[in-house]
Amino acid sequence: MTNRAAEVAIDFNDGAQYERFMGRWSRAVGAMFLDWLSPPKSARWLEVGCGTGAFTDLILRSCEPSAIVALDSSVQQIDWARSRLQDERLHFQVAGADLLLFPPHSFDVVASALVINFLAEPSGALYEMRRVARPGGSVAAYVWDFAAGRAPNACLVRGLRQMGAEVPQIPGTEVSTLDGLTRLFQTTGFYDIQTTALDITVEFDEFDDFWASQTPGFSPVTKIIASLSASARTTLTAIVRDQAVDHEGRVAWSARANAIKARTA
């Protein structure tokens, strides 16, 4: 994925780390998104920014597609996805979102999971997604609600800010709201635009699993934590534990994604 370096640099190229960081969240919210999207069976799909293939797998399992092209700009993420998903209907491609190498009207459904806000030019990507969708086809996306502080790692961000640390804004935070997504789709020529918020809760076997999954090496938050003193890290761990572990010892965290779907003319 292409990132807005002016806001914060994030490198998503480590497939194994990204899967541990986001895989279970992607599957939980992706299933809700597909229920809401209610796509037709036997559709031709394009997935823009497939990452490690968590959402791709959900499409294969629940939507009965006739074909899927799943693309991502990260060779490492595509390699990870290819090693775990084999299906005659599925074709992976290393490519960016700004220039989709397909003829107009090639797909029935064009979808993007947890990606749009990270793109350098979201509107350019949406123009391309609209171009390759068939007339009356569906173009849809969802992103974490970073603006409201509802991402999976929000408790770490909240804890750091509580301690006075400066945490950079996630790329495209303004696009992550329902209003931001709606404006983006309106200005790129879609109609029949609908939005919804998707709330999920993910449970973990233990706090250490939650902590490790939310502190991958590529995350700017992890780099900030690494710069803290040992005593400050202990304080942060206690703050996060207090948020993520209930009085019965259950480890869980809730997050929200904002979703949008629209039609092409």
Image: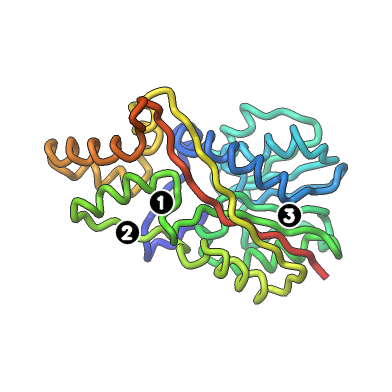
For discs 1 and 3, the disc positioned in front in the rendered view: 3
**Whole-percent x, y for residue 16 in the image:** 48, 31
Residue at position x 51%, y 64% in the image: 120
Find disc 2 in the rendering and name its residue.
168
Which circle's residue, 1 or 3, is located before the other in the chain? 1
N-term mark: 1 or 2? 1
Q: Nearer the viewer, residue 239 or 127?
A: 239
Q: Position of residue 21 (x, y in %)?
A: 45, 37
| Whole-number angstrom distance, CA of label 1 to CA of label 2 | 11 Å
The local crowd at label 1, few if under 14, some if 14 to 19, many if 20 or more residues have their Cα within 10 Å, is some
**Mark 3 lies on residue:** 110
Measuring from the top left, give residue 48's x and y in whole percent: 65, 52
Q: Which residue is farthest bottom?
A: 187
Secondary structure beneath label 2: loop
Q: Secondary structure at mark 1?
A: loop
Q: In whole angstroms, how far apart are the C-alphas of marks 1 and 3?
A: 25 Å
Q: Residue at label 1?
A: 10
Left or right, 166 with reference to 10? left
Q: Do callouts 3 and 2 mark residues in contact (Cβ within 8 Å)?
A: no
Cα–Cα gap, marks 3 and 2: 31 Å
**Marks 1 & 2, CB-CB < 8 Å contact:** no
* Amino acid under disc 3: Val
